[in-house]
């Protein structure tokens, strides 16, 4: 995957395409928002793509778009906290709540997938993480 910075109308910070193997991040955001958006799109890359991950393991699809957004934003929020990036907590929580309200059990169902993805990303970005 490659990352490109550009103006992206009507997004919350980024887009990801498995077909094009690209992540686009909105230009001009604060550093914290930029990193959080990148974490969010990388989470989509790992969680919501082909039916197998990069290691050939089956990856079940999310139940719906709401669940996919809850998962990606949850991964982003946890990683931002881990790296002590001051995320906009109000935005993250309202974003997740907005999607989760369409499926109140989405956060619970997604918990294991979120933590598996956080751990997968940390193995690359911080191999000494526990």
Image (cartoon, grey):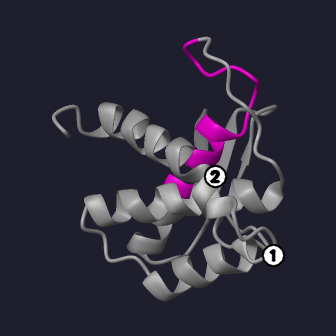
The spot of residue 25 in percent (x, y) is 61, 59
* Up-down relation of residue 76 to residue 60 (above or below): below
Q: In which quarter of the image is the C terminus?
A: top left
Q: As rendered, which of 56 and 37 lies closer to the eye? A: 56
Q: Is residue 100 left or right of residue 64?
A: left
Provide the secondary structure element on which disc 1 rests: loop
In terms of secondary structure, where does tag 2 sit? Answer: helix
Residue at screen point 37% across, 56% down = 79
Q: Residue at x 48, y 40 (%)?
A: 117
Q: Where is residue 68 in the image (x, y as percent from the top left)?
A: 71, 53
**Residue 41 in magenta?**
yes
Residue 1 lies in the magenta stretch = no
Residue 25 visible from this viewpoint: no
Please provide percent x and percent y for residue 93: 54, 80
Earlier residue among tags 2 and 1: 1
What is the magenta range? 39-55
Q: CA–CA distance between discs 2 and 1?
A: 28 Å
Q: Is residue 24 above or below residue 122?
A: below
Q: In which image quadrant can residue 26 be found?
A: bottom right
**Tags 2 and 1 touching, CB below 8 Å:** no
The foreground one among 44 and 107 is 107
Q: In which quadrant of the rendered image does the N terminus lie?
A: top right
Give the residue at mark 1: 10
Residue at screen point 67% across, 19% down: 58
Which label is found at residue 109?
2
Give the residue drawn at x 26%, y 59%: 83
């Amino acid at each position: 995957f490659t990352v490109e910075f550009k103006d992206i109308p009507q997004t919350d910070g980024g887009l990801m395409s498995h077909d094009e193997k690209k992540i686009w991040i909105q230009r001009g955001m604060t550093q914290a928002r930029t990193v959080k958006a990148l974490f969010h799109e990388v989470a989509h890359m790992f969680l919501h793509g082909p039916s197998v991950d990069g290691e050939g393991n089956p990856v079940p699809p999310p139940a719906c778009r709401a669940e996919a957004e809850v998962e990606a934003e949850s991964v982003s929020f946890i990683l931002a906290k881990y790296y002590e990036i001051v995320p906009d907590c109000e935005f993250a929580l309202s974003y997740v709540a907005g999607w989760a309200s369409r499926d109140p059990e989405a956060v619970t169902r997604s918990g294991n997938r979120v933590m598996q993805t956080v751990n997968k990303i940390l193995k690359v970005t911080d191999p000494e993480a526990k």
